[in-house]
Image: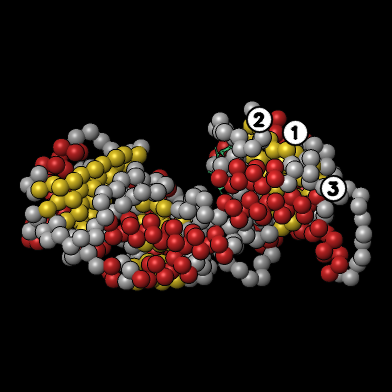
Amino acid sequence: MTGAFAKQLKPFATRDIKILLLENVNQTGRDILAKQGYQVDFLKSSLGEDELIEKIRDVHVIGIRSKTKLTAQVLREAKNLIVIGCFCIGTNQVDLNYAAQHGIAVFNSPFSNSRSVAELVIGEIISLARQLGDRSNEMHRGTWNKVSSKCWEIRGKTLGIIGYGHIGSQLSVLAEAMGMSVIYYDTVNLMALGIAKQVPTLEALLTGADFVTCHVPELPETMKMIGPEQFRLMKDGSYLINASRGSVVDIPALIDAMRSNKIAGAALDVYPAEPGGNGDYFLNDLNPWAEDLRSLKNIILTPHIGGSTEEAQSAIGIEVSEALVRYVNEGTTLGSVNMPEVNLRSLTVEEPNHVRVVYVHHNVPGVLRKVNEILGDHNVDKQTTDSRGEVAYLMADISNVNTHEIKDLYESLERLSSRIMTRVLY
Ligand SMILES: NC(=O)c1ccc[n+]([C@@H]2O[C@H](COP(=O)([O-])OP(=O)(O)OC[C@H]3O[C@@H](n4cnc5c(N)ncnc54)[C@H](O)[C@@H]3O)[C@@H](O)[C@H]2O)c1
Ligand SMILES: O=C(O)[C@H](O)COP(=O)(O)O
């Protein structure tokens, strides 16, 4: 697969680059991309598969958030696509492997919304402990219901964090500052912040925590990792929070655990199926147990707003757009989640007869020799290469290339059996 502008083999011009931004990507990001002169098409919501396939066909870049599913089936139709920007943390909505195998780099923003999620969870811990959602709903309905029974301070309680990454560790610091004890479970051995303690098993976490909060990525291993058996292990009257991915918690099991008063409250920000945009939406349409969930007491249901703050969205807009610009204009893969990270000096100085070659290829023996046979007819100023699994990425800056030689150079690389994608930037 090759970017159309590479195929045309004319001098690289940013105005040739077509970008589709979905899911209300922040203005900061839109401004950076528009300033480059790219053609930017912007939509507030996500798109269903058929419409997405229609729209993705001729774009070079797509920017999405957590709702847009870039499956192999969709990407197969994206003949000109060279890069995907996930303007969020999660990348589970993209078939990363398929993308890499077809030379499409994927970038995200690994921690720009972590603090926002951690703060939301802190708010939820207090809200659940004090049954704030129920009291507020009652007042909205005109009912004064002053109770202290089963309402608690969070000071001295234990927070159990599943997944001690960017969000989990940030949350750990905030929770300790409010007087909570923190235990965490992670598949990786990680340095504890403050006086938090890593526990060796999920069971140890579930049996020891008053509040359990999930901050793991969506993976086969995390699918329904909190189900009937895990609720059984949790303390009587404990609380569950999930602001990670909807697949992590078995919701019918949560409903049972809350109906039996085993679990005293829950906060859910994410769901197994979520709509593509805002509007009237009944969870029922997508999730059959929605009515049961809504009828429970002391449950906070939010529409996937963990990362939805002005600060986070603005920072993500800048971070991901800048990565896209570097990749499109210069081929730099620094920060990519599915490609080897390769970088060469910035292409800022006008250098006559200079071209930059980007050659994405299958990671098989003998490629460099063949590539260098082709590049060797010219003066290779600098070259770098790296591999990640089955995909390798080579960048070379070459001088003394006459304009009439560029087509030959490009076509010779394209003919190699190892080729995934060739770009020649000049
Ligand atoms: N609700 C929101 O708006 C929102 C916002 C940001 C992120 N998220 C979700 O939160 C997730 C976590 O974000 P993060 O930035 O902290 O990710 P991270 O990658 O920094 O941390 C995830 C941690 O989970 C651990 N982990 C992986 N599998 C595990 C398992 N089976 N058991 C225990 N631990 C496991 C990892 O080792 C890692 O330390 C993201 O993947 C994303 O899906 C949601
Ligand atoms: O992965 C993420 O960063 C969060 O789930 C937030 O996703 P969003 O940008 O679609 O709100």
Count the marks: how many? 3
Indicate which disc, 1 or 3, sits on the residue closer to the N terminus. Answer: 3
The N terminus - image quarter: bottom left
Q: Position of residue 236 (x, y in %)?
A: 83, 38
Tell me the amino acid under the disc marked 3.
Trp
Residue tagged by mark 3? Answer: 152
Mark drawn on residue 199: 2
Indicate which disc, 2 or 1, sits on the residue closer to the N terminus. Answer: 2
Q: Position of residue 59 (x, y in %)?
A: 35, 65
> Which residue shows up at 18% across the image and 62% down it?
350
Mark drawn on residue 208: 1
Mark 2 → mark 3, Cα distance in angstroms: 25 Å
Circle 3 packing at 10 Å, graded few (<14), some (14-19), many (20+), is few
Is there CB contact under 8 Å for labels 2 and 1?
A: yes
Is there CB contact under 8 Å for labels 2 and 3?
A: no
> Which residue shows up at 22% across the image and 64% down it?
12
